[in-house]
Amino acid sequence: MFGFVPEMIAKSGRLARRMLRERGGAAALTFALTLIPSLAGIGAAVDYSNALRIRAKLQGAVDSAALAAVTQVDGSTIDYDALVNAINQAFTQCSQQYNMNTDIMSWWTCVINSYQSILSSNSASDISARQVKAVFGAPTGASTPTVSTNVDSNGVVTVYASTVQQTNVMKFFGQNAVTLGAGAQAMRGSGKVEVALVLDTTGSMAGTKLDGMKNAANSLVSTLFAIPGSSSRVKMSVVPFAQYVNIGTSSKGASWLSGSEDLTVPVAAHCDTSYPNATYSNPYTVNQTCYNDGSPYNCSYTAYANVNYGAAVTTCYPASSYTSQWYGCVGSRNYPLDLSSGVNAASPVPAFRDTWCSASLTRLTNSTYTLSNAISSLSASGETYIPAGLLWGWRTLSSSAPFADGAAQTSTLQKSLILMTDGANTLSPNYPYHYGSDVATSNTLTAQTCANIKADNVRVYTVAFSVTDTTIKNILRSCATTTDNFYDATNVADLTAAFTRIGQEITAVRLSK
C-alpha cells in the first residue's frame, strides 16, 4: 500500500541534485518551493502508515472486548477466588481507615461502597475496558484508549474505543497528533436451545476425572445460561449413564413402563443355619485379576488354611413378605425398538426392581440450581453401555413420550446432544438387560443410535475424555454431526476447553459488526 513512499524519496533526491546543478536564483527558489511539499507528502505517508498499524491493533482489541463482554457479562466466568480476596482486602482497608467501634457509620459506608465497586467490576463496561487495554497494550506514541460500551435490550454489546496517536513527521508541519477510533458489536444467537448433556459416570471416571468433569459441566451450564433471556430461551437435561440409565421414579406406573410398580413378595416360613462361633487361623493372600469398567487390575483377598466352624446355630423365621421396589432403573426393548425414541403401552420400556444403576437423570429444565446440583452430586461406578445414555439423552429432548418435555421443532429452535465418555463399550445387551460381552454389537448400536438422533434434526457433539481406544474414537467422531463437533480431550483442561467451545457454539457468540 505504501510502495510510493520510497519512490517519492528517490524522486525528491533526483530533483534536489538537478536543482543544485542549476546556477540561477530562480532555480534555487523553485527547488525550495518544490522540496517542502515533497517532504510533507513523505511525512504524511509515514505517519499514515503508522496510524493504520495502530488502528488495526485497536480494532483487534475492540473485537476481543466485545466478545469478552457478551460472553462474561452475566458472570459466566467470574473468578470467585479473586472476588473473595478483593472483598477481604476491602474489609481490611476500611477497618484500617475507620474504627468500627467508634465510627460504625463511616466504616459501614466504606464497606458498602467497596463491595458495590467490586461487584460492578463484572459489568460489560468494565470487562470491555479491561480487555481493550490488555490486548491493545502500550504502542509507542499512543495514549491509553478511551472505551465506551453499550448493551441493548436484545443483549447486543457495542464497544467503541479511541486513542490519540502522536505523529513523527507531520508535527513539523503543525499536526502533532491524530485521533484513531474502532468499534465492534457482538451478539448471541436469537433462537431457543434445548441441550441434553449425556455423561459417562462409570467406574473408570472415579477420582480426579470425575471432579474435572463436574467442573467442566457446571461451566457449560454457566455458558449456556449467560445469554440474555436465558430463562425463556434455554433448557437443559443431564443424563448420567453406566450399564443402565436411571430415569427417576416420577414415571412409576406409566403405561409406557412395564414392571415399575412396587411388588409385595411373599416369603415362606424357613430356617437358616449359621456359625457365629467360627474361628479362622493361618491366613494367606490370594492374588487375582479384577476388572473395573472393562480394565484389568491386580487385586487380592485373604483366605485361611484352617477354619473351625464351631457349633451350628439354627434360627427359624415365620412366613412374611417384603416390598420389591423400583428405583428408576430401566433396560432396553428388543432390537430394533432400542433404537427408537418413541415409546407407548404396546411396546413398553422394561423397568428393573431392586437393581442398581446410575444417578437419576434430570429432565429438561431452565433451573441452573437444579442442573448444578445434579452434576455436583454425581458419583462413579459400573460398566459402560453407551447406547443407553444416547437413547435417553435423545428422549429428554423429544416432544413425544416418554417425557414430552421438548418443544416441537421450529426454525428458531436448536436441539443439541452432548455425549462425553472416557472409554469403550464393555457390555452388550441381553435384552432387556445389559450384561453381555459382545462389544462389536454395542459399537454397532452406538453408531445406529447416533444416526437416528441426527436424522431427528438433533445436533450431536461428542467428547472422548482420556480415551486411548481408536475404535471408539472413530465411532464418536462419526457420531458427531460434523468432524468439528468431535473433541479429543486428553486431560481435564482439554475437557473444560471443549465444553466451553461447545457452549459458545450452541449460543452462537459472534461479532455482528
Image: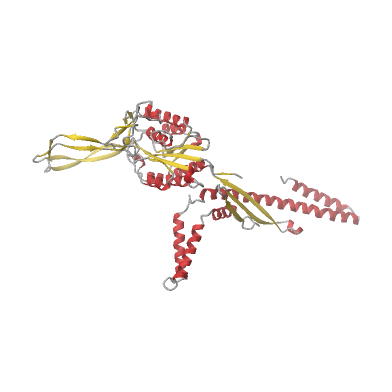
Farthest residue toward the bottom? 102
Q: How is the image coloured?
A: secondary structure
The quarter of the rendered structure image containing the N terminus is: top right
Spot occupied by residue 163 in the image (x, y as percentages of width and height): 64, 55
Quick check: 167 left or right of 414? right
Residue at left offset 51%, top offset 57%: 120
Q: Nearer the viewer, residue 414 or 122?
A: 414
Q: Nearer the viewer, residue 350 or 344?
A: 344
Q: Is residue 327 above or below residue 80?
A: above
Residue at left offset 35%, top offset 35%: 384
Callout count = 0
Spot occupied by residue 17 in the image (x, y as percentages of width and height): 83, 51
Q: Is residue 398 above or below residue 499?
A: above
Q: Which quadrant of the view contains residue 214?
A: top left
Spot occupied by residue 237 in the image (x, y as percentages of width and height): 41, 40
Q: Which quadrant of the view contains residue 201?
A: top left
Spot occupied by residue 244 in the image (x, y as percentages of width and height): 34, 35
The quarter of the rendered structure image containing the C terminus is: top right
Q: Nearer the viewer, residue 315 or 400?
A: 400
Quick check: 144 left or right of 97? right
Farthest residue toward the left? 311
